[in-house]
Amino acid sequence: MLADGPMIDAFRVTLAAEDDFDGWRDAARGLAEAGVPAQAIVWQVRGREPDLFAAGLPPPAPGSSFAVPRAFIDLAKAAICNRDPERFALLYALLLKLRSNRHAMDDRADPLLDRLERLAKDVRRDAHKMHAFVRFREVEDEDGARFVAWFEPDHHIVRREAGFFIRRFANMRWSILTPGLTIHWDGATLTEGPGAVRRDAPAKDSGADPVEETWKTYYASIFNPARVKVKAMTKEMPKKYWKNMPETALIGGLLAAAQNREAAMIETSRSQAPMPLSNVKTSWDALRAEAAGCTRCDLYKCATQTVFGEGPLDASIIFVGEQPGDQEDLAGRPFVGPAGEVFNTALAEAGIDRSTTYVTNAVKHFKFVLRGKKRIHARPDTSKIDACRWWQEQERGLIRPALTVALGATAARSLTGRTVTISKVRDAPLTLADGSECWVTIHPSFLLRLPDADARRTESARFVEDLKRIRQRVESLAA
């Protein structure tokens, strides 16, 4: 028993919501400026039981504000959405470190920083799942059509990710229902509501829904039994999301038939009858719309837009480049800048009509560095190539070309999954996982970088010869 009653030895901060970054930041700044240690603060969210023995906040210390690196703000905005109850205190502890050492964020061995980065990573992973697995179903209300989705996030990400859905579905009236919060967009204003339960959302397969049918057609068309790995699939798309996704109703049957389909694919290879072009177009439209909101890597944050492939969906040749350049990023089309002009000229000399080919890139967003006002191309690293590989695999899976051409080492890496040396593989085809041929040649931008005119003429002529050989090979496959 305490002789003199309980001691008030802590400051209480009550935040407006679980993801209240602004409230945390304002309180943390004042506490840090006043020199309050982390262990003397109780962080709580409005609605929870208050700490009866906690004191109010200290008055701000005049003239003692301090700056923090932008990297800390980005980390805090993500980590604060994690469900870990210690996140507020952990972030405050790191803030105190930064007050005494502005370079504390550079200490990669710091266990506090490591833990916070893992919290932020979990939040970003959850956001990726929300982007990928939210499925809207059309319902009618007093104002007409509204699209409603049910989602169960692992963390407090709904407000954080609302902007993604506003940008992507700006002209739709939609609602996203989750257990903790609902958000509603009317085409002009976002509003919030209390959490919902699953039965408040329209059930999967509750009726004929063209949106659901599009997803089912798309998923069935891209499902590749030769590449399916059940453990990897369920890790990327956990079963907890399946009940909300119309296409997952197909998974059981597709997996059950996978071995037979794989054998049939190997046996018949390219002689297999192609999917009707109308179905390919429907699936391609869905794929392109999905890619427009791609966040598989962080390049989307600075790029103007996703630059998807273009060309006929029954093309015999797919050309895969590296990534969009400055002009491609602005135009939203592949190979329209200086390298595109070189490419078009070489195709014409080789007797290939570009309009009969499908042209895309291994990486769909422009990676660059700023030099003054200019955006200078920067080669995408392996993580970006691997993250974006999924898109070109789906493009190729729909179009099923007779032959794929890798323009440069980045494209070759994306198509084969390994690093190749162009000079060693340039004169003979490689076999891709689906059994089709891949030819590797230079990227047209290589010619633009050659300072010597004679070398440029020699390499240009060799590039044209590569393209001629490719044209002849396609013609022989069609004969």
Image: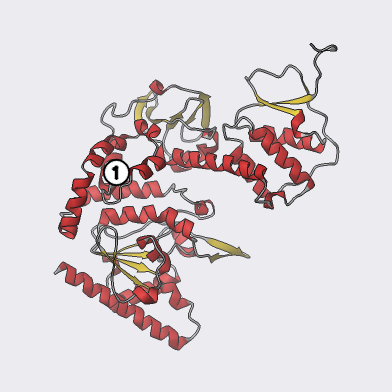
What crowding class fits label 1: few (fewer than 14 Cα within 10 Å), some (14-19), or many (20 or more)? some
Q: Residue at x 38, y 45 (%)?
A: 232
Asked if 422 appears above or below 258 in the picture, the reply is below
Q: Is 47 or 115 nearer to us in this picture? A: 115
Residue 433 to residue 287: above or below: below
Is residue 401 among what the camera can see? yes
Q: Where the N terminus falls, by quadrant?
A: top right
Please state if 74 lies on the left or on the right of 174 as rendered: right
Amino acid type, callout 1: Tyr
Which one is in front, 188 or 236? 236
Q: Residue at x 71, y 19 (%)?
A: 51
Residue in the picture at 69% in, 33% down: 89
- Identity of the residue furthest to the left in this view: 479
**Which x, y percent locates residue 425?**
34, 73
Which image quarter is the C terminus in?
bottom left
- Farthest front residue in view: 1
Image position, residue 55 (x, y; %): 78, 22
Where in the figure is residue 19, as x and y percent of width and height? 60, 32
Q: Which residue is at a point 15% across and 54% down the rendered structure image?
A: 273
The one nearer the camera, 371 or 86, is 86
Residue receiving disc 1: 219
Residue found at the far bottom of this picture: 454
Q: Is residue 321 visible?
A: no
- Give the answer, above or below, for where 366 lies relative to 463: above
